Amino acid sequence: MLKDNLFSRCCDKCWHSSEKACPDYISCLTQGPLCHHDEKCENKKKENISRITLKSMEKPMIFMGLGTCGMGAGALKTLEELENVIKEENIDVEIRKTGCIGLCTLEPLLDIKMPGRTRLSYGHVTEKNVRKILNSVINGKPEEENLIGQHFSDGDENWKNVPGFFDHPFFINQKRWVLKNCGINDPVDLEQYLANGGFLAFEKILKNELQASVCDEIEKSNLRGRGGGGFPTGKKWKFALNTPADQKYMICNADEGDPGAFMDRALIEGDPYRLLEGLMIASYAIGATQAYVYIRAEYPLAIERLIEAISNLKKFGFIGENILDSGFSLKIKIKKGAGAFVCGEETALIHSIEGKRGMPRVRPPFPATRGLFDKPTIINNVETLCNIPDIITNGYEWFCAAGTETSKGTKVFALSGNLNYTGLVEVEMGTPIREIIFQTGGGIPDNREFKAAQIGGPSGGCIPPQHLDIKVDYENLKTVGAMMGSGGLVIMDDKACMVDVAKFFMDFIQRESCGKCIPCREGTRRMLEILQMVTSNPSSDSSMNSLERLSGIITLEKLAEIIKSTSLCGLGQTAPNPVISTLRYFRSEYEEHIFNRKCSAKVCKELLTYQIDEDKCTGCTLCARVCPSEAIKGAVKSPHYIISENCVRCGSCLVACRQNAISVY
Amino acid sequence: MSNISLTDILKEFRDPARDSLIPILQREQQQRGFISKEAMIVIGEKLNLPVSKVYGVASFYNQFRFNAPGLHQIQVCRGTACHVKGSSTVLDSLEMDVGCKSGETSKDGLFSIEVVACVGACSLAPVVVVDGEFHAGMDSTKMRKINKTLRKVHNAER
Amino acid sequence: MLELIVNDKPVKADKGEMLLSVLRRQGIDIPTLCHVEGLTPTGACRLCVVEVEGQSGLVPSCACQVYNGMKVKTHTNRLIEARRTLLELIMSSHPDDCLYCQRRDTCELLELASKLGIKERRYKSVRSNPSLDISSPSIVRDPSKCILCGRCVRVCEEIQGVGAIDFIGRGSDCSVGTAFNEGLNTSSCVNCGQCITACPVGALTEARHINRVLNAMSNPELTIVVQHAPAVSVTLGEMYNLPSAADVQGVMIAGLRKAGFDFVFDTGFSADLTIMEEASELVSRISNGGVLPMMTSCSPAWVKFVEQYYPEMIPSLSTCKSPMQMLGAITKSWWAEKNKLDKSKIFSVAVMPCTAKKFEASRPEMGIGIPDIDAVLTTRELYDLFNIKGVKPFELKPMNNDNPFGQRSTAGKLFGATGGVMEAAIRTAHFLITGENMKNPVITELRDMTGIKEARVKIGELEIGVAVASGLSNARKLLDEIKMGRKDIHFIEIMSCPGGCIGGGGQPYGTDFESVRNRMSLLYKIDKEETVKYSHENQSISELYRDFLGKPLSGKSHTLLHTEYMNRVVMK
């Protein structure tokens, strides 16, 4: 912390500190002082705030996006070079490390804000171009290459002829509520969160509100669980609130196991305090004095930031005993998940925290009445909790104004797959999927055709082109056999094989099933085996096999139905969805695999044939040399040929051939 | 690897009960790269849990491995986005190049391959994590290049 | 009292009851594979699903509490199809070798398949075939047949407090096994066999000794003797589907002879012998300030349990061998001498309600040079042996045991039930201390199925505290109390299996609470009706001491009838 910061005492009249907090401590810090009247002190506070919010600044500020995706794209190398440049050229700047702003395609992102000017955002900033970009901005003539746009802000002079950052097609249709601070603030800097109004909601409820009225407010907001199920959050809280117990627990589920989803990771990496504030409000509302964040061990950066954020909160007395002199005490513990998709299920997650195998148990009793260590326990998803502070601050009416009849507010999606812009987006409920894909996501690259949008991960379904106008809404998505899920949205173009996609999910599910109940353990395995049979090598076929494949598809549908209705937990009950939905919309692809024994997307390897065009082949032997299975034969300078039985269909020869002589069909 | 012993790890936990089991296993694996039988027996004794339960828990979760990992750990993400963008081809060629399957350690002890459900970096698909470092937009050629570099470094050190 | 509507008819139920038990009480047949009365319901097999109005999914009745006004359907087409499919799914990954399976006549899976009318293979699967685990002297595990119902895991953990096995791995690779999936012999398994009686299929069976016995019978040089434990004769009848529980000792003896055993002895005789030694040991410990409380040692799973979990309490264990081992030792010494037989030419077989006895017989200290006992058959194996040998015991004329080991008191017979050893020992201790028999030899506090029973007993001037536990998790509770400093208990009887030997792991498959209770009342009936009620009044016992052993705790006794224990290090 700086010498004079938000937490320093303004003068001797100010009596409270983090050790001796009063109920108004937070507003006193950021809007005060409230404990005494002194214009000098007020000005001091205001100066502090404008320093933190960059309304006033002395030297240029550089923002470096250092989320997992930024770092994956090479942000650390950029940073290293940036620091070199600053040292070498003796430039006086400050560097602020931020989370991910969501536009992952253009990572590494680097922003520069000159005093009094708006903030400029650059994309694809590497160790090669960082010097040039930095110098150009400092010299007042920003490079146009790689420039994405400027962040308009009151009181700062705009750069001429530079578009607004949030007018970029990726951002223009977004409604960034929970992502507000992501990529803007230094995620673990508590001052920055506070200066932007953070923890005022928490202070407000501690000071003024009964537990029941907090639950009421959330219930009226119609906020529904963002983890996939869509259960009304306020209603759930009330179950726990109304169950008498000597101990209650609040758990944040950050075990984002859906392959294709990274909302929780980005939210925690980008704005951990928002999540923690939501968690603290929820804990107060249900009367829990112990809260847990159950987070995947695969997210080391998010864990690191969370640990730092929690220790800051402890340091300043925002958690611990008798918080803000309210009588409310709360501890927050981090529990690292050990890698099990099924632990997203509430009872499995509870077992996992208890140190057991993450096997779900029969419900009821629901965790809200009997959960962790047999005590009332509420489990909420990261995004759900991130919504809480603003609902408390702005009121339920504000929240309800956005969205559809049954689904209010916004939804964060992790946009990935075959899109021009991938990343993290937040849109208002009711936004058509088409808009998300073709506007926000910038459409399909390389002029290919859109084939399907996989939504909701292994529990969800595929949305085909004819349903692209469907609006994001819990109920709507169900009508086309998909579900909201936690927010993974994977876009597939015509190179994707839908049988393969179904097989991919069944393979995932049968491995991730906990193994407890028969329909899920055995049923998903059988479904996978049927799909494997459908995509297996035709050379070993007998007539019996084709019959079996046909009956396989019929049993596939029956089996799916039984698995849905008899499985013990949500994982099993939704496990067949990827198959059901692909069968519903892409039946002809299944038929092609079964009857023609072909995969026209050229994905199902065993159904492919590689061939060398004798006329084109010059006998350069390149293909024979790269072939890992010695399937290519031929003398030097004479046409080669492929021994089909030996071919493992790896595609190496196709890549290697310079004569374009190898074809696949 | 670091040399914090299991005894010292166990001391980090005050009055450990069953809910400390997974954190203890995680600490142990972090220190030694895997969890040995001996460690599970000691942990079971400390927590007053049958070893069968310790093993039952450890074998349930993807994270835990029971044999020593290679010098370089390669994690291939098999999330949906990575799959759609061809991670299976990357995995196949990696396995062929290194000479062991996922979940195994190569004969020279240099590499171990692991398949991860999703590392949550879908917009960089396909992703491979080598010794904790993310590599985006992978294909077979890039993968081979990385391995080649690692081998070179290793041979030079020898 | 609650009322629910089942298949459109009103049904009464108690608050807190599980739907499955209510339905079964109504005579509605609901299939299950994972349910065991008295154990935590897991809802794993899903076969017991029913439709409950207002719920879209199907509800597992085993884990569903009833509520007032609940509307339930149990046999709609949707349910029938669901149950069938579930069963087909298990069957699809189950080996097809029913013809060779030991459980072919008693397999719950097969029974359900026929009940639900499954006749066509709709699902095929590719399965790896995990190998057989024959490492244990008592129990054989065939993981390929395991249907992962988890009954064994729960019995081992909840009833026996051992937890030698658990689920391993996840998803379709899930299995049941020991720590590190190694042989059962390296695990903390105490060989009690409760998992076998709980197993619905052929995944768990005893290590069979039938062939050993058959081979011995075909060797003309050998004299084959057999002893039968008190619990066997009150159980065997059930395997022949006798209408009501009955003691079938007479025809069983006849059957044993017909099957080819040269001499038939009663373990009840050596139970009396055990009492002579053990009661004397107790009296001696009390009067000479020996280690108290003293704990019985007739249950070999219990002995192993102490050796591995409570080695510091080994001095509390009575040094007496179990009745089976005592009779084995006496047979190959005194009886052999008396009949001028070479002891190495005697093949000694024991029919036991127990699988741990197989382990006990294999302990190296059980025999001088050669083992006291050469083969142990469970009650189930005896039934099989009879069939193999074409013996139909109920068509035979009842016969008596061979002497001198054919006589027993009813005290010896009581060994079959929990609390029986204690009662028998107190009867004789009373005589040893006061010189006269108890006025009422029955100690009612010790006579039921309760897991832990205690009583204060007055013997003349002396008052002692006794405790009886069955089921090793109950034993654990009791031992922990003692370790915490409880001093008011002087003598403890522990039986590893719930209800005692009559509920042993070698008893018929699917032995439940009800059947154990029936066997228990048979034993009490015998005690009530027969006249010789005291071990010290068994004439053959007196003869044995007079002619051979001298007196209880004599040097000869110590060599032949007493043993020692070891601190057993296993993977706990």
Image: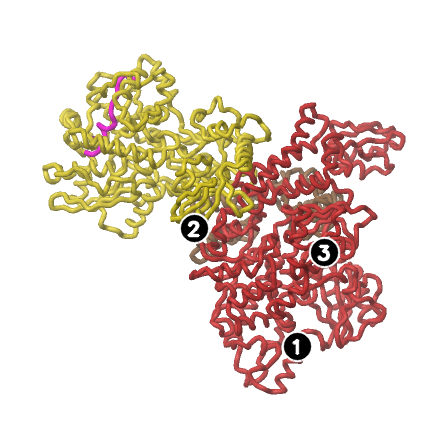
Q: Please tell me the numbered disc located at residue B47.
A: 2
Image quadrant holding the C terminus of chain C, namely top left
Question: What residue is disc 1 on?
Answer: A49
Q: Residues within 10 Å of mark 2 (few under 14, many from 20)?
A: some
Q: Secondary structure at mark 2?
A: helix
- Chain B on-screen colour: brown
In depth, the one of A356 and C125 nearer the eye is: C125
* Residue located at (58% from left, 70% from top): A201
Decide: marks 2, 3 in contact (CB < 8 A)?
Answer: no
Precedes in sequence: disc 3 or disc 1 = 1
Q: Which chain is painted in yellow?
A: C
**Stretch of the chain drawn in magenta:** C261-275
Task: Indicate the chain coloured red by its letter.
Answer: A
Task: State left or right for residue A226 relative to residue A93.
Answer: left
Q: Secondary structure at mark 3?
A: strand
- Above or below residue C436? Residue A372 is below
Confirm or deny contact between disc 3 and disc 1 (CB under 8 A). no
Residue farthest along the top direction in this orientation = C220
Where disc 1 sits, the SS reads helix
Q: Residue at x 53, y 25 (%)?
A: C96
Q: Quadrant of residue A553?
A: top right
Q: Amino acid at mark 3?
A: Gly
Q: Quick check: marks 1 and 2 in contact, CB under 8 Å?
A: no
Mark 3 lies on residue: A423
- Under mark 1, the amino acid is Ile
